[in-house]
Image (cartoon, rainbow, N blue to C red):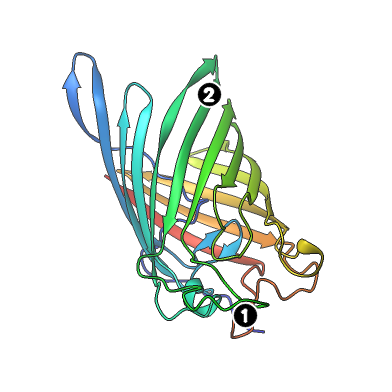
Amino acid sequence: MENTLKIATCPLLCTAALLATTAVHAQQQGPEPEYSISYNIGAVSDYRVRGIAQTNLRPAVQGGIDFAHKSGIYLGTFASNVNWVKDFNGATKGGIEVDLYGGFRDEIADKTNYDVGIITYQYPGNNSGADGTPGAGAFANASTTEVYLHLTYSIFNLNYNRSIGNFLGNLDSKGSQYLDFNFGYDLGNSMTLTPHVGHQWIPNQGAGGNQGNYTDYSLALSKDFGNGVVVTGTLLGTTTQKGDGTFYHDLNGRDLGKSTLTLGVKYTF
């Protein structure tokens, strides 16, 4: 097992833990803009989603566009290079992730908000599961769609996602669920500390049907340098070694859920 910590030395962008901030192009109507459009670009030293490596412990370059209307309706897209579709599912195509999402958010009460929407993770041209081979080791198409509900109270966030089809190439995995909790603590000097814990359920996987289930946890420290630049360092780990200990190993034996430190930088404009 490879234990070398890989850290990119040039501009880095976010995992799910590195979140964008403002700077928008807006059409003004009165004192409040009707809508805003923001753009972001950056990189990460190791692209992780729910604690699992998407680039096989290597860096990723990423970017996105977000549209938000004052009514609460929003749309967005995100793109990144990935390796897991080939190195985990054994596909020969599928090296790019493109996310499309949209939803509605609003305030329930003072300091309390909800956000409901749908997101699809697309891997254009991927041929994961294309041969239709049945039995152990078989995969479905990697592209996945989820619905979600996010609740926020003050600095606290509770998030729930559920797949409406197979989840990331796993056969018979419709209804996979992810629940996570985090909060952002303001340290002053434009620095934020964000603890996180989440749990992924993927039904019907492996002996006993639960080998895809695991918990992930992280602690992220971010610094906002102003002018749209945010840098984040994240310590993270998972419980993927439970069960047979190999479900989240790729075809080269890499443990995609191993503990690590990731670094990222994001520029929003």
Neighbor class of circle 1 (other Cα within 10 Å; few <14, some 14-19, many 20+) is some
Q: Position of residue 179 (x, y in %)?
A: 66, 44
**Dot 2 corresponds to which residue?**
113
Q: Residue at x 40, y 57 (%)?
A: 265
Specify the amino acid type for callout 2: Asn
- In the image, is residue 97 above or below residue 29? below
Asked if residue 188 lies left or right of residue 13, the reply is right
Residue in front for this viewpoint, 174 or 220? 174
Q: Position of residue 188 (x, y in %)?
A: 52, 36
Q: Position of residue 37 (x, y in %)?
A: 26, 37
Q: Secondary structure at mark 1?
A: loop
**Dot 1 corresponds to which residue?**
254
Specify the amino acid type for callout 1: Arg
Quadrant position of the N terminus in the picture? bottom right
Q: Residue at x 23, y 14 (%)?
A: 31
Asked if residue 95 lies left or right of residue 113, the reply is left
Q: Position of residue 158 (x, y in %)?
A: 62, 35
Label 1 and label 2: CA atoms lie apart by 40 Å
Q: Earlier in the sequence, mark 1 or mark 2?
A: 2
